[in-house]
Amino acid sequence: VQLQASGGGLVQAGGSLRLSCAGSGRTNYAMAWFRQAPGKQREFVAGITWNWGTTVYADSVKGRFTISRDKAKRMLYLQMNSLKPGDTAVYYCADRNGDITPRINEWKTWGQGTQVTVSS
C-alpha cells in the first residue's frame, strides 16, 4: 500500500486548506495525520479508525481541524480551518493495523508529505 498526500500550499493566517491522502483505508486499520515543522520532531495531529470513524485530535488543533475518510474512494482528508503560523509544517498521512495512537513509531506506512505554510 502506498499513501500519497496532497493539498498543501501557502495560506494566510485565518484561512483554510484541505489535505487529501490517496491509497488509504483497510479493514481494522487506523489512519492519521502527522506534521513536522522545521527543527522540530514529527507530531501527531489527528487520527481516525477506518471501520467506525472514531476520531482523536491533538489539543493544539481541536476545534479547528477535522479528519474524515471516504471509504468508497479510499481517501483520507484533513480539513484545516482558522490556520495559524504555528501550523506551518510538512504534513504526512500514515496508517497502522490497530487503534489510533500518537506514538510515531507504531505507524507503519507513510505518505511522502505535503507542505503547509501559513503566513501571518
Image (tube, grey):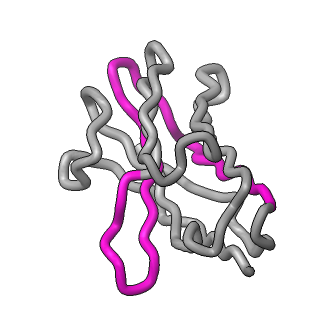
Q: Position of residue 115 (x, y in %)?
A: 60, 72
Residue 47 falls left or right of residue 101: right
Q: How many marks?
A: 0
- Report whether residue 2 is seen: no
**Location of the C terminus (image quadrant):** bottom right
Residue 26's image quarter? top left
**Location of the N terminus (image quadrant):** top left
Q: Position of residue 30 (x, y in %)?
A: 37, 31
The residue lying toward the viewer, choosing from 31 and 86, is: 86
Residue 19 falls left or right of residue 11: left
In the image as oriented, which residue stretches furthest toward the bottom? 39
Residue 22's image quarter? top right
Up/down of 119 relative to 8, above or below: below
- In reply to whether residue 3 is colored magenta, the answer given is no
Q: Residue at x 45, y 76 (%)?
A: 37
Up/down of 119 relative to 36, above or below: below
In the image as oriented, which residue stretches furthest toward the top? 52
Q: Residue at x 65, y 20 (%)?
A: 72
Q: Residue at x 46, y 13 (%)?
A: 52
Q: Position of residue 106 (x, y in %)?
A: 20, 46
Q: Residue at x 73, y 70 (%)?
A: 9
Which residues are the magenta region? 15-44
Up/down of 74 relative to 118, above or below: above
- In reply to whether residue 37 is colored magenta, the answer given is yes
Q: Position of residue 113 (x, y in %)?
A: 51, 65
- Report whether residue 63 is seen: yes
